[in-house]
């Protein structure tokens, strides 16, 4: 096939995929603007990632370096508003839609299959949620599906060297984005080894791709070694303290229905079946096996149910092809209509609109509680921390400005000499991150916050004096008085929509007791 004929074959599906990607991008932009108008602000983790972006490194305790780079680039290029810091995540969501369309095309799907797969993924609650805030999760399916697309094209005879380089680059950067990429690659390797496509792994191109991914990810490994494997300690602590909810196999499977929209299960389940049967989609059983292996690995590791999200674009693409083959006699399918399954797509759209408040906070908090109570809607809970009227994904957007305002008032009540040496301590990275971000954005000019959680512990105390502390912690006055001679409550955090553990006092502490000497090593808490 000549380059011209290849271009003619690729151009129509690529244009269609780009169109859907543009719609997805505008959709996420609209949701961010609207939810901000309703009063939903910065998300807890966003403060932390922005702080990490100001301390760029090859590794971090609880995530890879890519999200820190994403935060820094977003802040430098677009600004630090709620909308600005989420732009790159929205772009990642659009890229996932584009890749879904191209996967459907590469597996043999026509326009009806492409359009259905992209439309369904665009409405998936998990994707609407993760593409709507600054996080590494939005980019995860981009790296995974780039690897899958590269393997499909290699299998079909396209330039092996070129696409193995693409595979290696995507896999290497994916490993720097999130450790779950390693488990996906294991599942992918097992899927290939169990089928005739194992031959793809025993080529010079494969060796080049694997060498490239190892070279790209190597600096992170060196960072882990240099810092005594903090990520492993973080994972061990999560298990020891039962941070995450453990689901049985049935619960883990059923959670996927909520994450990807219940009606969409009529797409991705047939997608897995069609890949495994290898009839309507030939020579792609390895991809179905990859999905099965990955599901098993994630369950055995007691991972959060949404950790499977990155593999769904391939399953939606396969599902679109399966439905296209199932209704091949339909005039709309034969004509290659954009909307070839109007009834199914209408049901998908209506149910997605009903469920939209579960993935994006499009209702004010009071209205959200009334709406979900009336419809008996309950989101998947992934952590054991108790919640208030809102799920944690929404509650973590409230209370931060009140907290920082109280800290700023306490800080400005100090003398200039005291302001130079005071420690501002956050009990967790969200509290510390909010102080660092909002404390300077609002002109309060607060000193850098310290915390014992995750990377904040690695950044140290910045030379502050532990005998003078403004502390944002959940301890009672009696507990704090065991360590400090003078304990003054300077504020109370009480936003009704914030997480319960974010309610409590803000203290001004003076004179550390000799019986409780301060050691920074004792403050480390990787969790």
Image: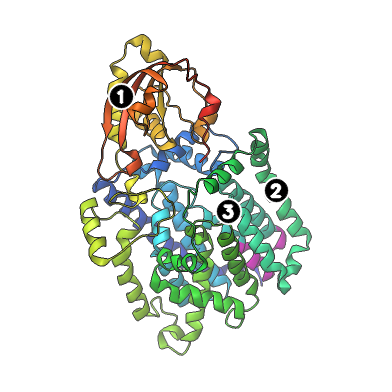
Residue 289 lies, in percent from the top left, at 62, 71
Question: Badge 1 is on which residue?
Answer: 408
Q: Examine the image and state in which quarter residue 163 appears.
A: bottom right
Residue 511 lies, in percent from the top left, at 40, 14
Mark 2 and mark 1 residues within 8 Å of each other at the beta carbon: no
User: By what rule are the colours in the image chosen?
Assistant: rainbow
Mark 3 and mark 2 residues within 8 Å of each other at the beta carbon: no
Residue 75 as seen in the image, left or right of residue 520: left
Question: Badge 3 is on which residue?
Answer: 180
User: On screen, 31 above or below 202?
Assistant: above
Tell me the distance, in whole angstroms, between the alpha carbons under discs 1 and 3.
39 Å
3 or 2: tag closer to the N-terminus:
3
Other residues around mark 3 within 10 Å, as few (<14) / some (14–19) / many (≥20)? some
User: On screen, 287 above or below 44?
Assistant: below
Question: Badge 2 is on which residue?
Answer: 214
User: Which type of secondary structure does the marked residue at label 2 adopt?
Assistant: helix
Tell me the distance, in whole angstroms, between the alpha carbons under discs 2 and 1.
46 Å
247, 14: nearer the viewer = 247
Q: Which residues are magenta?
A: 148-161
Mark 1 and mark 3 residues within 8 Å of each other at the beta carbon: no
């Amino acid at each position: 096939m000549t380059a011209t004929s290849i271009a003619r074959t690729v151009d129509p599906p690529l244009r269609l995929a780009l169109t859907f990607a543009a719609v997805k991008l505008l959709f996420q932009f609209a949701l961010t603007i609207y939810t901000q108008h309703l009063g939903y602000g910065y998300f807890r983790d966003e403060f932390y990632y922005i702080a990490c972006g100001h301390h760029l490194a090859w590794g971090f305790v609880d995530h890879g370096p890519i999200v820190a780079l994403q935060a820094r680039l977003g802040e430098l290029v677009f600004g630090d508003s709620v909308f600005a810091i989420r732009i790159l995540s929205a772009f990642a969501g659009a890229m996932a839609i584009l890749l879904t369309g191209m996967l459907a095309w590469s597996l043999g799907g026509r326009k009806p299959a492409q359009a259905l797969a992209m439309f369904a993924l665009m409405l998936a609650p998990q994707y609407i949620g993760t593409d709507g805030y600054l996080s590494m999760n939005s980019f995860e399916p981009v790296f995974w599906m780039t690897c899958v697309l590269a393997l499909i094209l290699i299998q079909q005879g396209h330039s092996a060297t070129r696409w193995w380089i693409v595979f290696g680059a995507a896999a290497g950067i994916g490993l720097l984005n999130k450790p779950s990429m390693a488990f996906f690659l294991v599942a992918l390797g097992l899927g290939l080894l169990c089928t005739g496509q194992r031959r793809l792994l025993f080529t010079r191109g494969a060796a080049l791709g694997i060498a490239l991914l190892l070279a790209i990810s190597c600096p992170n490994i060196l960072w882990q070694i240099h810092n005594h494997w903090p990520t492993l300690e973080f994972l061990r602590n999560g298990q020891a303290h039962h941070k995450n909810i453990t689901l049985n196999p049935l619960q883990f499977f059923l959670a996927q229905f909520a994450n990807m929209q219940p009606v969409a299960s009529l797409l991705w389940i047939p997608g897995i079946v069609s890949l495994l049967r290898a009839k309507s989609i030939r020579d792609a059983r390895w991809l179905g096996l990859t999905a099965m292996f990955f599901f098993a690995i994630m369950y055995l590791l007691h991972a959060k149910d949404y950790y499977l999200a990155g593999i769904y674009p391939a399953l939606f693409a396969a599902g679109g092809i399966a439905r296209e083959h199932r209704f091949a006699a339909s005039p709309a399918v034969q004509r290659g209509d954009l909307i070839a399954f109007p009834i199914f797509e209408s049901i998908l759209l209506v149910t997605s609109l009903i469920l939209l408040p579960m993935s994006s906070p499009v209702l004010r908090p009071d209205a959200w509680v009334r709406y979900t109570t009336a419809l008996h809607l309950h989101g998947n809970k992934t952590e054991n921390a108790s919640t208030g009227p809102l799920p944690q994904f929404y509650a973590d957007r409230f209370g931060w400005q009140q907290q920082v305002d109280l800290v700023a008032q306490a800080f400005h009540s100090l003398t200039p000499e005291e302001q130079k040496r005071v420690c501002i301590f956050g009990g967790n990275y969200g509290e510390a991150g909010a102080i660092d971000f909002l404390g300077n954005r609002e002109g309060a000019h607060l000193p850098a916050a310290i915390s014992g959680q995750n990377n904040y512990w690695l950044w140290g105390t910045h030379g502050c004096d532990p005998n003078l502390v403004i502390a944002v912690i959940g301890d009672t006055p009696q507990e704090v008085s065991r360590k400090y001679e003078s304990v003054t409550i300077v504020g109370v955090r009480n936003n009704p929509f914030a997480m319960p553990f974010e309610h409590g006092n803000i203290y001004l502490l003076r004179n550390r007791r000799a019986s409780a000497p301060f050691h920074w090593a004792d403050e480390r808490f990787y969790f």
